[in-house]
Amino acid sequence: MKFRSALPLAAMLAVLSGLALPASAAQVLRNLVSIEGVRDNPLIGYGLVVGLNGSGDTTQVKFSSQSVVNMLKQFGVKMPDGAEAKSKNVATVMVSAVFPPGYRRGQAIDVTVSSLGDAKSLRGGTLLLTQLRAADNETYALAQGNVVVGGLNATGKSGSSVTVNTPTSGRIPNGANIEREILSDFSTKPSVTLNLRHPHFETAINIVEAVNRRFGAVATTRDATSVDVLAPENPTQRVAFMAKLEALTVDVGVDTPKVVFNSRTGTVVIAEGLRVKAAAVTHGSLKVVISESSAVSQPAPFGRGQTTVTPQSKVSVDQGNGNMFKWPAGAKLQSIIDVVNSLGASPDDIMAILQALDQAGAIEGELVVI
């Protein structure tokens, strides 16, 4: 069995290694931490999109008809008992949005509208007034407006159809207005907590030292996850202090080099700085092929025999071409790329080799499978 060419993979790994930042590179503090109490909050709601050109929910979606009946009741229109509102111009949807930190009443946010039933398209529809709730089941925003859909669906009388992108999902820019504010203790706490995006003891202590050099002894840390910084009580001074704080440059701690393999897509990413111990590796394959066919046995003329079908089986075994290679102790990423490129190994082959090296303790880093 011959290995498939892996030139694009090796080229990609080389580019990634060239773009990787040095282990001790300094970064802006805002890229390393998030501020406790200053974060987005998800909102969700259930609503109706009307005005569709026959592409809405069908009668199979019972809750769509029930939603229309309940909406009409709010406007004084009462349907006969047991009657269903059969309209193909209506679609039930879920509406989602993100409440940005610090937003006040009256400010607008974007919303995403997604079909819940079996509607074919939301193009041309209008979302009716929908309440958006948070995890506490309280309403924080109201959404309404025309849905902008990037996809389309066209169906002919014969049943043939063409779909481009996703016509059952769309957005409404500035489609919701904030009606209730989400309180935060950011401006009332005596200190501000900085949560590291990637916890690391060295990075945490570097943040403390950088802040204390700039503002005095105001920063402390308890672990590798967060840093507490004393901040001014005056709101305006606190905002100015945070602006200067986020602009500080901090040396990032050295992380353990990782090899990340995506088992679903076959993507392999090797971080800069990964080294391997001395190891010899051989990789081959055993392939067994069984092919089945049928042969027809025809009797001679006037032989009074019967035509019969006999099965024919063919079994072949291919042991493949095993390859053995050796990495010297302390080999770097470029050495690994060169070997992979010379063998033409596929991502699956690379993963098998890396797993074997990890089990043998030859990788000076961490193997991660996602």
Image (spheres, helix red, strand yellow):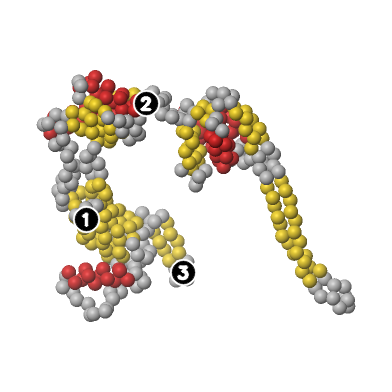
Per the image, the residue denoted by label 3 is 159
Mark on residue 137? 1
Mark on residue 341? none
Q: Nearer the viewer, mark 1 or mark 3?
A: 1
The image shows residue 54, relative to residue 5, as above or below, that is below
* Residue in view at x 30 percent, y 69 percent: 63
- Secondary structure type for disc 3: loop
Label 2 crowd (10 A; few <14 / some 14-19 / many >=20): some
Label 3 crowd (10 A; few <14 / some 14-19 / many >=20): few
- Secondary structure type for disc 1: loop
Calculate the distance from the C-alpha at mark 1 to the C-alpha at mark 3: 43 Å
Residue 177 % position (x, y): 19, 52
* Residue in view at x 27 percent, y 71 percent: 66
Residue 198 % position (x, y): 35, 34
Of the residues shown, which amino acid type is indicated by label 1? Asn
**Disc nearer the start of the sequence (1/2):** 1
Question: Nearest the camera: 19 or 200?
Answer: 200
Calculate the distance from the C-alpha at mark 3 to the C-alpha at mark 2: 60 Å
Q: In this view, does 277 lie to the left or right of 84?
A: right
Counting every numbered tag in the picture gives 3
Residue 283 % position (x, y): 64, 37
Q: Is residue 138 left or right of residue 8?
A: left
What quarter of the picture does the N terminus occupy?
Answer: top right
User: Does residue 173 appear in this view?
Assistant: no
Question: Nearest the camera: 150 or 296?
Answer: 296
Per the image, the residue denoted by label 2 is 253
* Residue in view at x 23 percent, y 26 percent: 219
* Residue in view at x 21 percent, y 58 percent: 131
Of the residues shown, which amino acid type is indicated by label 2? Gly
